Amino acid sequence: MLQELDIQRATSVSSQVKRLAPPLPRIPESIFENLEVESSRSRNISACGWSCCGGILLILISFWTLGWNEATNSPKENSLVYAFHHARNASCDYVDENNNDHLIWLSCPVIASPILAEDTPLEIRATLSEAGLELRGTQLEWWVEMLQWTEVKVCRGSRKSKCIYRYEKAFRHYDVDPSTFHCATKIRSGCSEVAPAEQPQLKLAELGRPEVLHGVVRAAPDSVIIGNPRNGYLLSQDLISQIDTKAEAQLINADGAAALLGTPRDLYTDLTFNESSARTYVATPRLGDLRLRVSASRSDFVSVIGKQEAGGRLGPYVIPTIRRSEPIEWLLSGDHADLQSLLHYHSREDSAAFWRLLGIFLMWLGTALLLSPLGEAEPSCMAVLCVACFAGAVLSSLLATISATLFASLPVELFMAAIGVAAAVFAWRSYRSSRGSYYEYYYGSDVSVEMPLVAGGPYDDDDHVHWFERRLDNRCIDSSDDEDDDVGKGGLSSKGRHQGRQSRPLPLHLRE
């Protein structure tokens, strides 16, 4: 009996203590929800910052690429386009004075060219005269070579790590030091034998002056005539230097070597020039023997694009426009029947189209990155944005190509940049319009803001956690509800996708 009284007394005391004690503060779950929202917002801001910075950087790079292309590669392209539309076809039979100060093109035979051997040093001239060579052309270059031991290195494998060394005699226009050979002192990896140490008695640099051992002679301006021998066209120095068809002659004989270096030797002659053989005295070459190698540039037929000056002289033509371009003064060896085939050769060096497309692509990519945060809420809108930007870039390139073809005087790259930016702005406005229609359809308002989802507790009839979408009027809609777009169904109006459905109230622990 006493125990029961003690238990009842303890129970009543504990209940009184609970009533007198202040209730413990309950942390609202909205705090955690706010933390989650703030964390998500900070992540979105960070992603937005990186995307925007990357987009701005790519756009700046694209503008720099287009500007650099305008200053470096576009002048060549502009000159090609201008020459295609404005060059006149001139006759090779006579010089038409009506074409003076105009851009002309013609394909004619080379009638006269200077004898370059007369302008060489005395030693070289005597050697060439001994062989009976006049060497008419536009450029003459020669080398005095000596037979020496040379090292040949052959490497195999993917990393070229296994190498084999062998040694043979060959003519070189410089002195070779045998002490630098890989197998000079002993047999190493890749060596089958020790390298020969035999050297010529004299060094090549000791046998003559540098201008005698190697030199170049070029034709003087107006010394090359094409067309009619009586009334032909004179080529400028730049046009003459573009004749690069070469023929090599290798000349060695005892008399020639003596005249060249004053040293009698048993040498050999192997002379070939312009596909015609000369006299040949064959002997076995020995270490230290000399050879004169000659390379001459000449052509029997040339095609020229340039300005016709007074007297039939061909020189550079400067395009009379404000757009930057390079002077037109081009020559190509051989006969070309039409202007297009002649320009096709020079257009191989034109890379303006590649850099233009690269600049447009960088601009499109930068614009897409810059505007990508706007499409995070609705990926389909971002896809439309990217397609619109790409279409604008393609349209700008087409317009730039057409303008360059027709006018060849507009700042094409800047025009393309303006078109690309206009296309991006148009895509952005279309995107904003689509976002406004999206929110107006779903929420009855065109406010393009994010509608965050908040977690709610389970209802009394189930244990499922429901997610709610916060409305502008601070009401919440259960996201698990079935969507019904039928008009008039259940007495609902057609103001919007969720406007006709009653909003469920927030649970007590979610209300602020």
Image (cartoon, rainbow, N blue to C red):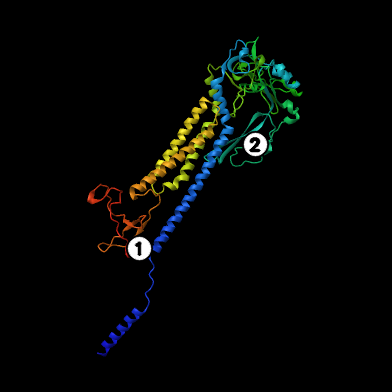
Q: Secondary structure at mark 2?
A: loop
Q: Nearer the viewer, residue 100 or 337?
A: 100
Q: Nearer the viewer, residue 208 or 369?
A: 369
User: Is residue 202 in view?
Assistant: no
The extreme left residue here reads 490
Mark 2: few, some, or many residues within 10 Å (few <14, many ≥20)? Answer: many
Residue 322: x, y in percent? 60, 28
Residue at x 47% of width, y 50% of height: 48
The extreme right residue here reads 262
| Sequence order check, earlier mark of 1 and 2 | 2
Residue 46: x, y in percent? 48, 53
Residue at x 37% of width, y 74% of height: 23
Q: Nearer the viewer, residue 477 or 300?
A: 477
Q: Which mark is residue 147?
A: none
Residue 12: which quarter of the image? Answer: bottom left
**How much space separates mark 1 and mark 2, taking CA atoms?**
93 Å
Residue 456: which quarter of the image? Answer: bottom left
Residue at x 26% of width, y 87% of height: 4
User: Is residue 115 in view?
Assistant: yes
Q: Is residue 407 left or right of residue 431?
A: right
Q: Which mark is residue 510?
A: 1
Q: Quadrant of the C terminus?
A: bottom left
Residue mark closest to the camera, 1 vs 2: 1
Residue to which mark 2 is pinned? 195
Q: Quadrant of the N terminus?
A: bottom left
Kind of residue at disc 1: Leu
Q: Nearer the viewer, residue 243 or 398?
A: 398
The extreme bottom residue here reads 2
Residue 62: x, y in percent? 53, 39
Residue 446 lies, with reference to residue 65, above or below; the image says below
Residue 121: x, y in percent? 74, 22
Kind of residue at disc 2: Ala
